Amino acid sequence: MFALVLRSLLIPLARVVYRPVIEGRENVPRRGPVILASNHLSFIDSMVIPLVAPRPVAFLAKSEYWTMGGLKGRISKSFFTAISAVPVERGTHRAAQASLDASLGVLNEGMAFGIYPEGKRSLDGRLYRGRTGVAWLALESGAPVVPVALEGTEKIQPVGKRLPRVRRVTVRFGEPLDFDDRRELRPVGPVRRAVTDEIMDAIAALSGQERASVYNEGPKDDTEAA
């Protein structure tokens, strides 16, 4: 109940303070499983998208946010619960597949799930090559993929800064991509690669970012996706 109250307060407060520009909100299906595949510029991306989307959006987050002690721990747990985050263990054996399995569980419950195909935040502003976990999710679940482009979130909390700043952000939701006709195609590796590349092309068209032909191999990111 507290999480619901917190969410009802956070959404209008964030919109008053940050005055986000939201485009294509109507492209997000109001019901049923859907994958929101976004570019990744800042730690706060996983907070921005759920606060501007027309429905709750679950993201993966490290389980430590739910297990910290004291007042800070209670606030952390309430906040991440309010934005529908899903706790996962990091750094354990088979962690990547466990994260994908948790993500698939969210979709199988008919919810919206957010993922960053790049894996890590882009520190230079370029859009990196997507990892195929997003395609695995789309093909396993049959859920449509809505490409998302964030702009300006890196200015709210730049790398190395602890406190957020007030900066205006833009969030664009693209038209849903349906890959249902490819779920039975073989071999699966090339299919997943092609689906991932199509998703990244759609994100690039929305964001206008310069493309990088390599994977983002930067420092470990708490929001990293498989």
Image (spheres, helix red, strand yellow):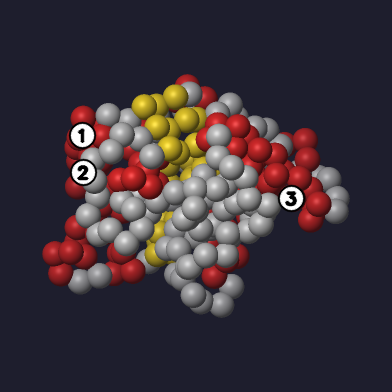
Provide the secondary structure element on which disc 1 rests: helix
Query: Residue 189: x and y, percent?
Result: 79, 56
Q: Which numbered disc flags the more N-terminal residue, 2 or 1?
A: 2
Q: Residue at x 57, y 53 (%)?
A: 118
Gap between marks 2 and 1, in whole Å?
16 Å
Give the amino acid type for the residue marked by disc 3 in the picture.
Answer: Arg
- Tell me, for residue 17, which label it has, or none: 1
- Is the Cβ of the residue at disc 3 closer than 8 Å to that at disc 2? no
Question: With respect to residue 111, does 85 lie above or below?
Answer: below
Query: Residue 92: x and y, percent?
Result: 51, 76
Q: Which residue is mark 3?
A: 192
Callout in the foreground (3, 2) = 3
Q: In the image, 75: left or right of 31?
A: left
- Tell me, for residue 179, which label it has, or none: none
Q: Which numbered disc flags the more N-terminal residue, 3 or 2?
A: 2
- Is the Cβ of the residue at disc 3 closer than 8 Å to that at disc 1? no
Q: Which numbered disc flags the more N-terminal residue, 3 or 1?
A: 1
Give the amino acid type for the residue marked by disc 1 in the picture.
Answer: Val
Task: Identify the image quadrant of residue 200.
Answer: top right
Total number of numbered labels? 3
Q: Residue at x 57, y 65 (%)?
A: 217
Give the amino acid type for the residue marked by disc 2 in the picture.
Answer: Leu
Provide the secondary structure element on which disc 3 rests: helix
Q: Which residue is mark 2?
A: 6
Note whether residue 128 is visible.
Answer: yes
Q: Quadrant of the N terminus?
A: top left
Callout 2: 10 Å neighbours few (<14), some, many (20+)? some
